[in-house]
Amino acid sequence: MSEVKYSKEHEWIKLDGEEATIGITKHATEMLGDIVFAELPEKGSNVDKDGTAGVVESTKAASDVYTPVSGEVIDTNQMIVDDPSKINEDPEESAWFFKLKIKDKSEMDSLMSKEEYEKFAKETSA
Amino acid sequence: MNIKKTSLNNLHIKYGAKLVEFAGYQMPIQYKDGIIQEHKYTRSHSGIFDVSHMGQLFISGGDDLTNDLEKIFPADLKKLKTNQSKYSFLMNNKGGIQDDLIITKTSDGFLIILNAACKYNDYEVIKSKLDNQYKLNLVESLSLIALQGPEAKNVLNKVIPGCDSLKFMNGNNHVYKNEKVYITRSGYTGEDGFEISIKNSDAETFVESLIENGSKLIGLGARDTLRMEAGLCLYGNDLDNDTSPIEANLKWAIPKSRIETEFVGSEVLKNQFQSGVKKLRVGIKPDSKVIARGNTKIYNDKNQEIGKVTSGTFGPSVEHPIAMGYVDNSYSTVNTKIFLEVRGKKIPANICNLPFYKKNYVKGEINV
């Protein structure tokens, strides 16, 4: 069974066994506006929890994408690089950013549940 | 300082605007559709922009007004016909641009449209340069609404019949709800369009009637992407106190008849006309999809810094990143290869012609 958690930097992470899929939340896309550019980490590279692992840009500004857990990048989603508007359309499903082979599952513990994140997102945007 | 609101503030909220502070005013950055849809709607139909934060300065009184204004502005004001407009500059003694503006000759003087962030300073500067001899009125009682896009003339004509006979960079008095409105055919998007100066109390119903006729409110976000595609400068980004109109590649706005005459900054401009300039504003097209924003450093192929980007975004109509900036004059030729430093990487790009998007009045022609 997969487990979905959320970070304070507005990323979601879905863990299936060792494989973690990471993207940005719908709330994040609403704050950013129309996304026109996405940059992803390189396949085979290692990323550290809370480190930069990509960039998204709207017409207005650039924002870093962070990884909520450490691991090795095993796949990236070329679809969102080719058509960044897909991130606005379907941020929490088909427009995932990258997949990691997770290094330490205990890093999931500090992340938020869906309910906790929704409360956090509401409070921080108010 | 208290944040100011325009007469359309309630309307912005009604139409779901995301409001931000801009030049001391609460202004809409975008509405519900978002910047890209708003940008495209302006290009395909028409968009309404609240530009009431901009300064509307009326100057009148005295036979020598035209002469005295020519000592300030490098425009050919003597040749200007009533209701005709010209783009010009308020400069400092070094030829640096303090503001870029539009001067229109009215029946009893001149109307100057000033940038919001510069208007109070401009007022003081112009007033003192005119030795307090004339009547200056930076009006707060009038709103300024821009209507831009291929359908602008049809939409406006339904609300104020007859305005479609105006020629580009010309204005005239019209009537709306028994009140005088002043309309010019001008804009800041690269599209055909109008700017309507209207009493604050009539602005809301006027804009609602434009919306009823098919137009949509557009925020400052799309205004910025539209003007960048059109290759137009934003004061504070692309123009400033240390940059002359010649360096800004706006030589066309200084008529030949004025080069030998005196105005504020004329010494420096005359010299630059003769000897050329060290830096020049250029269009920049990155090879890839990477966006270079303002302050991005520009390098040559030998890794030497040669300039910096002053505006950059993704162009929704040209569907490619676009930028403009200043480079050492020897790199300003179209198709020169340059490199933009974005997040530590050198991104290849080319110097290109402006504008990126050109309207040919039949259909949009894309220059990228």
Image (cartoon, coloured by chain):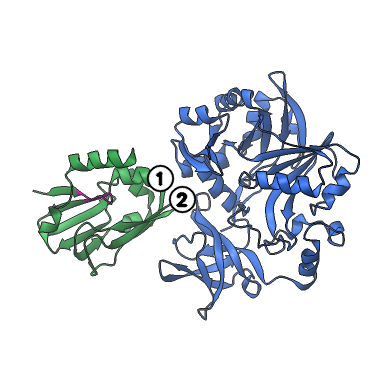
Quadrant (top left/top right/bottom left/bottom right) for the C terminus of chain B:
bottom right
Is A11 covered by the magenta stretch?
yes
Q: Residues within 10 Å of mark 2 (few under 14, many from 20)?
A: many
Q: What's the residue type where badge 2 is placed?
A: Lys
Judged left or right of residue B231, residue B256 is: right
The residue sitting at 84% across, 51% down in the picture is B70
Where does the image place residue B276, in percent across and percent down from the top left?
74, 71
Q: What is the chain letter for disc 2? A: A
The quarter holding residue B180 reads: top right
Q: Is residue A110 above or below residue B288?
A: above
A86 vs B365, nearest the viewer: A86
Q: Return the residue at label 1.
A: A33
Q: Could one spot residue B25 in this view of the protein?
A: yes
Query: Which range is magenta?
Result: A6-12
The residue carrying pointer 1 sits among few (fewer than 14), some (14 to 19) or many (20 or more) residues within 10 Å by Cα, namely many
Residue A72 to residue B176: above or below: below
Q: Nearer the viewer, residue B349 or A123?
A: A123
Q: Residue at x 51, y 68 (%)?
A: B297
Chain A's colour is green
